[in-house]
Amino acid sequence: PEYRIFRPIVNSTNRLDHLMFMLRSSSTPLILVLVVVVVLLLLPLPSTPLLLPSSLVVYTSASNPKPVLGCVCEYSVLQPLCTYDMAFHSSLLSTTPTHDDVDDDLKVSLVWDEDLPSTPLSSAVIKLELDPDDADLSARQVGGGQGLGNPHGEHCEDVYIFGASRLREILEGEGVEIRLVPERE
């Protein structure tokens, strides 16, 4: 299916504003207002799923046929995610079954993989839209609040926090590989 990003309409061009204007206008016949209301009620809702910014998806693209776990960003692009958690990443690469020794309470943080290019939503094939309850969205300071790059801590980045067992299910079920980028910690 085709996906599009949902953005709340905040300008005066939406249908409800037009309807309210017509109701307030004394020159608009009542029958015309009723016809417009009936037409608006009978119009089908859009059939394309709506993705909110920060939604998590598994997707492929023409430039990368491997499944990628990424997040929806503003401006209709998908950004791949990576981890800096070496212990979790090494357990994923293990050839012995370690499903039982992954602690359910272990949390794994994923951040934007800035080394990989983003993908326009229009050229991606969404394989799976993750449930919003699969991960908690948080933020962390860039630069740790100290140093020349971010002395007051006003710059931050999104962090998606998964339960280790749920992330493992998603990665193995969809055949996704997560890059380890330890310098992002």
Image: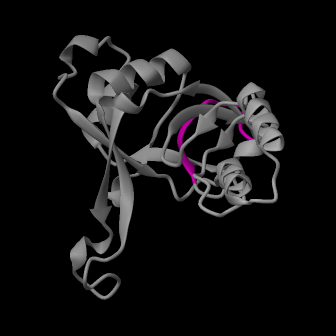
* Rendered location of residue 152, percent (x, y): 25, 83
Tell me: residue 133, above or below residue 86.
Answer: above
Hey, which quadrant is residue 18 in on the image?
bottom right
Task: Confirm whether the magenta stretch covers residue 56.
Answer: no
Res. 132 in view: yes
Q: Nearer the viewer, residue 82 or 2?
A: 2
- Residue 127 x %, y %: 63, 24
Nearer-the-camera pick, 118 or 179 = 118
The C terminus is located in which quarter? Answer: bottom left
x and y, in percent, of residue 75 in the image: 65, 58
Residue at left 75%, top 59%?
26
- 24 with respect to 100 (left or right): right
Which of the pair 177/19 is nearer the observer? 19
Relative to residue 138, is residue 36 drawn left or right? right
Q: Give yes or no for residue 69 being in the magenta stretch.
A: yes
Among the 4 quarters of the image, the one containing residue 139: bottom left
Which residues are drawn in magenta? 63-73
User: Where is residue 35 drawn, in percent x and y?
Assistant: 81, 35
The residue located at (38%, 17%) in the rendering is 95
